[in-house]
Image (cartoon, helix red, strand yellow):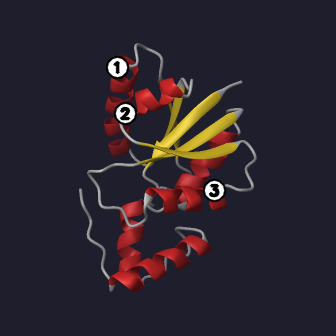
Amino acid sequence: MKRAVYPGSFDPVTYGHLDVIRRASEMFDVLIVSVLNNKMKNPLFSVEERVRILKEATKNISNVQVDSFSGLLINYAAENNIHVAVRGLRAITDFEYELQIAQTNRKLSGGELDTVFLTTSLEYAYLSSSSVKEIASFGGNISECVPDFVAALMTEKYRKRGGVYEQQD
């Protein structure tokens, strides 16, 4: 059985992420979409909320599982007997960053973790979670960026926060 992990923050999950998930799910018997609990960032949604959102967004893709992890991807992959990571690429600038991480993961895992890159479909190449959050925080229309239920959740979050989000890089 061919298994792969698609790790990320997914804060929020966008149509670009869902495009990669759908396409990767066609390549592997099991695709585990795993939410990274990155303590260096200040996310809009908690890890638990992002897991619930992803489960809802992928409920019609039978071979997708949703999980979360903290720490290094190589440790998560080893603990779950996964040897392939999936990463999405929007632009050449993504490739430079992702290539370095892929090579580091391969080296640190003793060659046990490879990375497969999928280029995002052109219709979603402009999307990033950061830009979606910024648009939403100012009350902009994000209906072409995220599923309707995600847009509604984001609107509610910003309403409770009183508007603009604080981005941590």
Q: Please tell me whether residue 50 is drawn above or below residue 161 in the rendered image.
A: above
Dots 3, 2 in contact, CB < 8 A: no
Front in this rendered view, residue 146 or 121: 146
Left/right placement of residue 121 relative to residue 165 reads right
Residue 108: image location, x then y, percent: 34, 20
For the residues labelled 3 and 2, the Cα–Cα distance comes to 23 Å
Is 79 rendered above or below residue 120? above
Q: Residue 134, how many percent across, how many down? A: 35, 73
Mark 3 sits on what residue?
55
Q: Name the residue: 52% across, 75% down.
A: 153
Secondary-structure class at tag 1 = helix
Q: Estimate the x, y position of residue 150 in percent, counting from the top left.
A: 55, 71
Q: Quadrant of residue 33?
A: top right
Residue picked out by circle 2 = 72
Residue 112 locus on image (x, y percent)? 48, 17
**Would residue 123 be seen by someone viewing this image from the given angle?**
no
User: Are the residues tagged 1 and 2 within 8 Å (C-beta)?
Assistant: yes
* Residue at image mark 1: 108
Does residue 43 appear anywhere in the picture?
yes
The mark closer to the camera, 1 or 2, is: 2
Is 58 displayed left or right of 94 in the figure? right
Q: Which of marks 2 and 1 precedes in the sequence?
A: 2
In 3D space, how far apart are the residues under numbered discs 1 and 2 (Cα atoms)?
A: 10 Å
Determine the CA span between mark 3 and mark 1. Answer: 30 Å
Q: Earlier in the sequence, mark 3 or mark 2?
A: 3
* Amino acid under disc 3: Lys
Residue at x 60% of width, y 73% of height: 149
Taking the spot 30% from the left edge, 50% from the top edge, the residue there is 39
Q: Which quadrant is the C terminus positioned in?
A: bottom left
